[in-house]
Image: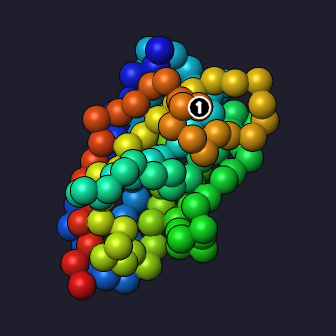
Amino acid sequence: QVQLVESGGGLVQAGGSLRLSCVASGRTIDFYHMGWFRQAPGKEREFVAAISWSGGRKVQDSVQGRFTISRDNAQNTMYLQMNSLQPEDTAKYYCTAGRSPSATPPTAQEGYNSWGQGTQVTVSS
């Protein structure tokens, strides 16, 4: 399995931006699907965005147009650029990685088998 470490979370005002990073180690991520999930207090963990090993992307409807997922295989790193943040985006954000032969990245947690510890994002109104 690949080890994942997230960074970049913090406290930001509504309308602000943050960039999350996920650095992988132990394996090259070239052939991994990579994704971001989030979990707010009292809620289930939910899909945010994912990028396949071939560069295909999936984004949750509620963050479409505001969040952008990208990857830099040379740096073994994935990013989540979050713009126009809203209080409802407050959650702990988790980086995840998984492998499958499909060119489409999974949107379900079951499609991934490596998880980071998470980074907290708090958006104040």
Residue displayed at 51% across by 37% down: 109
Tell me the quarter of the image containing the C terminus.
bottom left
Residue 58 in the image: state x and y as whole percent.
66, 53
110 is higher (above) or lower (below) than 19: above
Residue 44 in the image: state x and y as whole percent.
37, 51
65 is higher (above) or lower (below) than 54: below
Residue displayed at 28% across by 35% down: 117
Residue beneath disc 1: 111
Where disc 1 sits, the SS reads helix
Closest to the observer, 42 or 113: 42
Determine whether, in the image, residue 33 is placed left or right of residue 43: right
Residue 98 picture quarter:
top right
13 is higher (above) or lower (below) than 117: below
Residue 74 in the image: state x and y as whole percent.
58, 31
Closest to the observer, 118 or 55: 118
> Is any part of residue 5 visible from this angle?
yes
Residue 5 in the image: state x and y as whole percent.
34, 34
Residue displayed at 24% across by 66% down: 122
